[in-house]
Amino acid sequence: MCGIAGFCNWGEGWQRNIERMNERMYYRGPDASGVWAAEDASVVLGHRRLSIVDLSAAGAQPMESHNGRYVISYNGEIYNYSIIRKKLREENRVAAFKGASDTEVLLEAVSAYGLEKTLDMAKGMFALAVYDKKERMLYLARDRVGEKPLYYGFTSGGKFVFASDLNSIAALEGFDNPINTGILEQYFRYGYIPAPGSVYEKIYKLEPGTILEIRYPFQQYERKTYWSMTEAAQRGEANPFRGSETEAAEELERLLKESIRGQMMADVPVGAFLSAGIDSSTVVSLMQSLSAKRVRSFTIGMWDEKYNEADVAGKIAAHLGTDHTELYITEEDARGVIPKLAEMFGEPFADSSQIPTYLVSRMTREHVTVSLSGDGGDELFCGYNSYASVDRVWNKARRIPFWIRRPAGAAAEIACRRRRGTLMTMARLLGAHGIEDTYLRSEIGEGFSIVRRDPGREAQRTVMDTYPAGLLREPRHNLMLMDLLMYHPDDILNKVDRSAMAVSLETRVPMLDRDVVEFAWTLPLAYCVGDATKKILRNVLYQYVPRELMERPKKGFSIPLQKWLREPGLRAWAESLIDRAVLERQGILNPDVVWRIWRDYIERDIWRLQIWYILMFQEWMAYREKGNREAEGLRRKN
C-alpha cells in the first residue's frame, strides 16, 4: 500500500512540484519517497512507499522494467504475484528477478503481455501508472471493485495530473480549479461524491475496472473497461450455481480460504478488524483456521450500549482463540478526530462511521502493518435490511396503476412538504416506476435546496440515476448491483482506505477477491435470504462460531452523533462552521435552508443526515481556505 502521483508537460519547477505531491501523501507511504522523470521531463512519476512485500531497496519505486521500456508507480498488492512470476520464468520472459516484490512481477508482466492481459491475470487491489517510453503512452488503471483510489484530470493551465490523494493535486503550485458545484447536490444527497466526479472541476475519479490511456502530447485521454461488475452480475445470473445450499456454502468457504490465504501473505505483521458482525467474524474465523499462530484481532467499543458490540466481539475472539485487542472510545476521542477529517479525505465526505474506522485503524497500526476487513458481505450476499424493505414497498405500490400512483404521489409530496421525513419519503415512493426507482427515491432525502442554484449549471447524474430498470432478472439483485457500482466503492471502500492510510495501515478485503465476487453473482437469491440475511455466509461461519453468538440485532459501526452534537463543545464547533456570515461569504450554501435544518434539530429534535453532511462540507471548506492562505503567503514570500 502506497501513494502514487505524477503529471505531464509541467515544465519549469517539475521537480519541486512532484516532491510537493509526494510530501502531501506522506502517510500513504512513510517508508520511502521516489521520483522518475523522462529525459525531457514530459512525464514525471512520484511514489510514496509503505513496505509490505520485499522490504529491501529492490522493491523501491518508481521502477523501470528490465528492458528499460516501461516505468511503473504502483499502489496496492497483487496477491497471486508468485503464480505470475512462475509463469514469466517458465516462459523465459524474465531471466532473473532483481528482488522479491510484486511490483517487479507486475511490471515485467506488463512488458511481456501488455497491460490489459496482465490485469486480467492479476488478483489484487491497486491503482497504477505505467509509462511506455517507446510509444510515449501513459496508462492509468484501477482495480476491479475500487479498493484503491486514483484521481486524474487537467489543471486550469492544461497540464495532465494524477494522484492517489486529491490533496496531492491541490498541492501543486498554481492549482486553482474551481469547486465543482454541479456535483454538490449529489454530495448532499448521499454524503459522498460519486465517481467519476470530484469536488474540483476537471478532476475526476478513475472508475473501478478501468484503464485510462493518454499519449504524447498528453492533451486528450481515452478510457476503456477491462472488467465490469455489471457484466459479472449478468454472467452470474445467466449461469447460476446448480448445487445445493450446502454445496454452495462449501464452495464459498473454499474460495474465501483461498482469498484469505493469499491476503495473509506479507513481510510485516498482519491482523484483522473484528466488529462482531457476520462478515468480519467469518474472515477472522477462516484466518484463524489457516494460521498456526494466534491471529491478531482488533475492535473498538463504546460506553453507550446502543452502539457497542465490543463485548460480543470479545466472546467471538475468545471462542476462536485469537490474540484480541479492544479499545473503548469516548466523545472526547471522537471530537479529537473531527479536525483531521477534511485533510484525511481530501474532499467532503460524511459517512460518520469514518470516525470509529479511523480510531480502530489507529489502534490496529500500533500492533500490525496490515489488517484484513470484512467489507463486501452485505452487497454481495444481500445483507442490508433496506433491500427487503424496498422490495416490500414496491410489491405493494405496483398493485396500484402507475397513472393513479404518479399524480397521487405528487399531490402527497406537496401536502407533506412541511411534515416529518417518513411521510415525505412514502409520498415520494408512490411515484416510482420500478424497484430500482423505488430504491433511488428512498435515497433522495427531503429535497432541501442546500446548494445555491446556478441557472447555468445542471446537476450531475450518477450511476443510480441512470441504472436501467430490470437489468437483472431478480429485483433485489438490481439493488445489490446499484450499491456495488456506487455506494460500495465511493463510500465504504473510500472510508476504509482513507481512514487506514491516515495512520499508514494497509487494509485488505478478502470478500472482494475476483473469484468470490463472480461466484456470489451465480447464487440463487434464496441461498442468501430467508429467516436471516446473508444465509450462505452464516452457514460458513457457523462451522466455526456458535450460532447463538451471532443471532442478535445488528448495531452497525456508528457513533451517536445525534446526541453528541448537542454537547456544548461540538455544538459550538458546528455553529461556528454554519455562521451566516461565513456562509454568505462563501456563496455556495443557502443559509436559510442550512439554519432551518439546524433549528429543526436543536429546537424540534428532528435529526437529518444532512446535518453531518453540511458540517463535513464546511469543515472541508475551512481546510481548503486555510491551505489557500498558506499557499498565497508562500507565493508572496518567494
Image: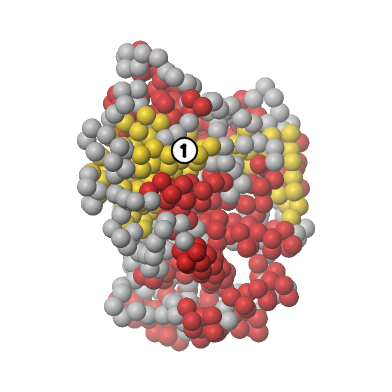
Residue 156 to residue 569: above or below: above
Asked which colour scheme the image uses, the reply is: secondary structure
- Say how many tags the image has: 1
Residue 291 to residue 361: above or below: above
- The residue nearer to you, when weighing 127 against 461, is 127
| Percent of width and height locating residue 212 | 29, 45
Residue 289 to residue 215: above or below: above
Report the side of 193 relative to 154 (left or right).
right
- The residue nearer to you, when weighing 499 against 58, is 58
Dot 1: few (<14), some (14–19), or many (≥20) neighbours within 10 Å?
some
At x 72%, y 72%, the residue is 569
Q: Amino acid at mark 1?
A: Gly
Q: Secondary structure at mark 1?
A: strand
Is residue 436 in sight in this rendering? no
Report the side of 15 relative to 306 (left or right).
left
Report the side of 118 relative to 274 (left or right).
left
| Percent of width and height locating residue 203 | 36, 58
Q: Residue 71 occupies which quadrant of the picture?
A: top left
At x 71%, y 28%, the residue is 294
At x 32%, y 62%, the residue is 156
| Percent of width and height locating residue 311 | 76, 48
Is residue 135 in sight in this rendering? yes
Residue lying at the far front in this picture: please name it: 638
| Percent of width and height locating residue 526 | 47, 44
At x 59%, y 43%, the residue is 504
Q: Which residue is mark 1?
A: 34
- The residue nearer to you, when weighing 150 against 304, is 150
Q: Residue 204 occupies which quadrant of the picture?
A: bottom left
Report the side of 407 relative to 564 (left or right).
left
